[in-house]
Image: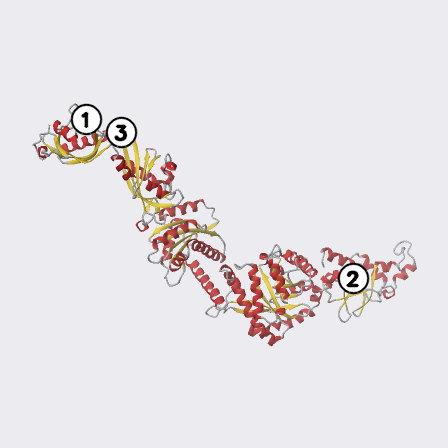
């Protein structure tokens, strides 16, 4: 035994209140050797108890094994050491410290010191345990070896929303945020089981579904054959600055977004699973957050990115660099750039809508770079680096600029941005140029009105493509503003037109119903404009485009009527392209109907376009609606449309759109029109002659019955005109000839009398009473002639009474049935 007077552990120096005493251990012993009297006094042990057995039984098994192992190693290494553990004696638990120094002859001497004692019989232990367990600064979670939850403290309940009765028996995976990879959780398990401890920051999911960062200390506890896991949590939600650019398990903890490696992996998998019908892009962007709000705004932006439906994957690269993968339809030609531009715009529009104005301003002050798969690379793994490189090349001088890694696309996008700026500037400054295109009345062949059209000139004075810029205005939702600007300027310019060209000329202004304002507000807006800027509303036509957005059964119809009651005419534009156009027409809400250029270009008699336009024109006229054909560029198109009875013609055949100071040139079409009207072919194409059989033989009055009979017997003709010096004197048909011919003519019973009859001249047998029709009569007026019961055939005469042609029963039947038109 260790004597009280030996070595540095001189127990004799300790009073009865001493908290330590000495001991000795020799190599190979299974217990420590102590002074029995001192031991009994130190631990308050009775005389009847075996000191050695009692003392050694006060240790937990694992502590005994670990202490003996340390002593054995001290003997071999000749190095001093220490060990702490709990021992239990007489219902009192003591936390003690063993210190030891190796001696000669494989022996170790040491000291045992009581550091802390607690009575486990009374309430002292429970009081201390409760205060330590239900603390206000750490969450505590205890699970078994299978990670089923056994216990948690109030801090954990308060910060996760889970109640003890809800969580007991649940697997700890109930807290899985879904942000970390399986590999991340596997590495935690391996480390805690091999080392007994893991520390780090994780994202957990609360009862309410929120994802919150937690600093976690996970410890493995063992007792005999049982294993437990103790988790100590500290909520980091209010200390976000400590999480910035900290990565665990493929996730950046502040933003809770995948890291570059994880994002690239998702991108590659998506590319491998895609059908190659879509174009894949990666956007890298660096927002310029305001000082002091960086962490809050970064987190808000991250949440919005995850909710953004335009993106297929999002990530965080660190240093405020975000990435997103978006996809758009593939297209050939310049239209692809427009689709790319629209998709990027849609992505950022939704992003700023979700995250608010502060994040939007940060994005506008920042930089954006784009990489496009199939353009600047074929490998999805390098798209992030390409997008970042493009972003870093941004000069920072142009607010909201997007830089593309691919040069030609970048140049095209720059051009498109310049066009957007031109549209916005032109509308806001009302610098849009107004051009006027004449609309010709086919009854007088004079200009009835001008349509006001917009034109854009860039800062270098070059005219830009109107259709492209109007399309951009639509994308920017500025069509209503554009219509207002053009309408206002054209109404103000109407006074000048009247001073120069007469007060009978009208003006047509366009109003699109497909705007953010809604159809009702557009109509109210048009009414207000006319009241403000026009003294002659009866000369104004409001042309409604995108008429599919018009609801004839709503209050919009009442607004139309109110506008018409002012004297304003209302027209439907692009008729035929909207499925409900006929409904609008039947409700009699409009005065004019405009046939789209699609049905006018290259129209020919008998084609599908021809029958469509003919049907629309006849229906419109039945409802007292005038018809305007736009886009007429050739003589042939004009001939067909005039023949169908179209009321107004508009197109390059007459004049291209002109600025106000060149409007006198709009009447230059008159020479070309005169040539057209004097052409016999044009007359035939335009009027009733169009349905007459061409090349009907004309017979002289002195020709014989025999000659007429031979022609009628061919079966090609049913009636023949008798013409002398251009004047039709009469007609001959089968019925007329039968009155004079004998049935025996041409048979074996033929007589000399029959032969004599055949030699009679036609002026002796022809009908001199017949119906005549003016050649200017339009084909669409045939129905009216039939209603008047004008007898057939009709001899067509020009204004001087000259014979032009003849229309028979068969011709009219062909026309009405729509078959075999000549």
Tell me the distance, in whole angstroms, between the alpha carbons under discs 3 and 2: 116 Å
Residue indicated by mark 1? 54
Residue indicated by mark 3? 224
Q: Tell me which numbered mark, 3 or 2, is placed earlier along the sequence.
A: 3
What residue do we see at 35% from left, 56% from top?
293
Q: Position of residue 814 (x, y in %)?
A: 74, 56
Question: Which residue is outermost to the top?
Answer: 48
Q: Mark 3 near mark 1, Cβ–Cβ under 8 Å?
A: no
Instruction: Left or right? Give the position of 416 relative to 388.
Output: right
SS type, badge 2: loop
Q: Mark 3 near mark 2, Cβ–Cβ under 8 Å?
A: no
The picture quadrant where one finds residue 229 is: top left
Instruction: Confirm whether residue 180 shows in the render.
Output: no
Q: Residues within 10 Å of mark 1 (few under 14, many from 20)?
A: some
What residue do we see at 47% from left, 52% from top?
328
The quadrant in which the N terminus is found is: top left
Q: Mark 1 near mark 2, Cβ–Cβ under 8 Å?
A: no
Vertical placement of residue 82 versus 739, above or below: above
């Amino acid at each position: 035994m260790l004597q009280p007077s030996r070595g540095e552990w001189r127990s004799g120096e300790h009073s009865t209140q001493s908290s330590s005493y000495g001991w000795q251990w020799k190599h190979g012993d299974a217990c420590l050797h102590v002074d029995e009297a001192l031991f009994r006094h130190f631990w308050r042990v009775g005389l009847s108890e075996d000191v050695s057995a009692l003392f050694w039984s006060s240790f937990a098994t694992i502590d005994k094994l670990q202490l003996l192992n340390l002593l054995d190693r001290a003997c071999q290494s000749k190095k001093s050491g220490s060990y702490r553990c709990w021992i239990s004696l007489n219902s009192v638990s003591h936390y003690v410290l063993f210190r030891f120094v190796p001696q000669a002859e494989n022996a170790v001497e040491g000291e045992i010191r009581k550091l802390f004692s607690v009575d486990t019989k009374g309430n002292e232990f429970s009081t201390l345990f409760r205060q330590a367990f239900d603390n206000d600064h750490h969450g505590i979670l205890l699970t078994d070896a299978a990670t089923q939850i056994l216990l948690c403290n109030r801090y954990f309940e308060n910060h996760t929303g889970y109640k003890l009765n809800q969580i007991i028996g649940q697997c700890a995976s109930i807290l899985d945020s879904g942000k970390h990879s399986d590999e991340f959780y596997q590495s935690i398990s391996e480390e805690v089981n091999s080392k007994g401890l893991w520390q780090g920051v994780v994202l957990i999911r609360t009862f309410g579904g929120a994802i919150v960062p937690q600093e976690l200390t996970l410890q493995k506890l063992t007792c005999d054959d049982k294993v437990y896991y103790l988790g100590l949590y500290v909520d980091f939600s209010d200390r976000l600055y400590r999480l910035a650019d900290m990565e665990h398990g493929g996730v950046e903890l502040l933003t809770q977004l995948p890291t570059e490696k994880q994002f690239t992996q998702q991108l590659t998998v998506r590319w491998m699973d895609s059908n190659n019908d879509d174009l894949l892009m990666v956007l890298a962007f660096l927002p310029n957050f305001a000082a002091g709000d960086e962490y809050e705004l970064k987190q808000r932006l991250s949440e919005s990115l995850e909710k953004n439906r335009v993106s297929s994957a999002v990530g965080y690269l660190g240093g405020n660099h975000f990435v997103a993968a978006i996809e758009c339809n593939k297209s050939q030609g310049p239209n692809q750039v427009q689709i790319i531009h629209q998709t990027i715009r849609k992505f950022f529009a939704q992003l700023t809508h979700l995250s608010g104005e502060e994040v939007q301003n940060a994005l506008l002050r920042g930089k954006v770079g784009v990489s496009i798969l199939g353009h600047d690379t074929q490998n999805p793994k390098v798209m992030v680096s390409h997008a970042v490189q493009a972003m870093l090349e941004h000069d920072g001088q142009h607010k909201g600029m997007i830089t593309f890694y691919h040069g030609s696309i970048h140049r095209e996008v720059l051009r498109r941005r310049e066009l957007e700026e031109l549209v916005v500037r032109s509308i806001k400054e009302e610098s849009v140029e107004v051009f006027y295109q004449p609309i010709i009345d086919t009854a007088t062949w004079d200009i009835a009105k001008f349509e006001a059209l917009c034109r854009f000139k860039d800062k270098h004075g070059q005219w830009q493509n109107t259709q492209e810029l109007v399309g951009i205005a639509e994308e920017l939702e500025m069509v209503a503003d554009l219509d207002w600007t053009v309408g206002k300027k054209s109404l103000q310019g109407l006074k000048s037109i009247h001073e120069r060209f007469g007060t009978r000329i009208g003006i047509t202004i366009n109003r699109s119903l497909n705007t953010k304002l809604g159809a009702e507000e557009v109509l109210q807006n048009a009414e207000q404009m006319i009241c403000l800027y026009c003294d002659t509303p009866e000369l104004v036509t409001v042309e409604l485009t995108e008429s599919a957005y018009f609801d004839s059964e709503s209050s919009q119809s009442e607004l139309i009527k109110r506008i018409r009651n002012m004297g304003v005419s209302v027209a439907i534009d692009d008729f035929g392209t909207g499925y409900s156009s006929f409904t609008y027409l039947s409700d009699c809400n409009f005065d004019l109907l405009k046939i789209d250029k699609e049905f006018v270009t290259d129209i020919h008699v008998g084609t599908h376009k021809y029958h469509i336009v003919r049907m629309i024109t006849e229906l419109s006229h039945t409802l007292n609606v005038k018809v305007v054909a736009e886009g007429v560029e050739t003589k042939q198109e004009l001939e067909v449309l005039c023949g169908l009875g179209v009321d107004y013609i508009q197109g390059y055949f007459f004049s291209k759109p002109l600025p106000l100071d060149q409007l006198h040139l709009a009447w230059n079409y008159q020479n070309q029109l005169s040539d057209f009207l004097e052409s016999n072919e044009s007359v035939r194409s335009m009027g009733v002659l169009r349905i007459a059989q061409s090349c009907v033989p004309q017979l002289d009055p002195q020709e014989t019955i025999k000659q007429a009979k031979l022609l009628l017997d061919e079966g090609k003709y049913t009636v023949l005109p008798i013409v002398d010096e251009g004047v039709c004197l009469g007609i001959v048909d089968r019925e007329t000839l039968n009155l004079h011919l004998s049935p025996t003519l041409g048979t074996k019973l033929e007589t000399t009398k029959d032969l004599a009859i055949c030699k009679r001249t036609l002026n002796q047998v022809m009908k001199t009473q017949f119906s005549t029709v003016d050649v200017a009569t339009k084909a669409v007026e045939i129905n009216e002639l039939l209603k008047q019961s004008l007898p057939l055939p009709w001899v067509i005469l020009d204004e001087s009474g000259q014979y032009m042609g003849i229309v028979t029963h068969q011709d009219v039947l062909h026309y009405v049935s729509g078959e075999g038109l000549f």
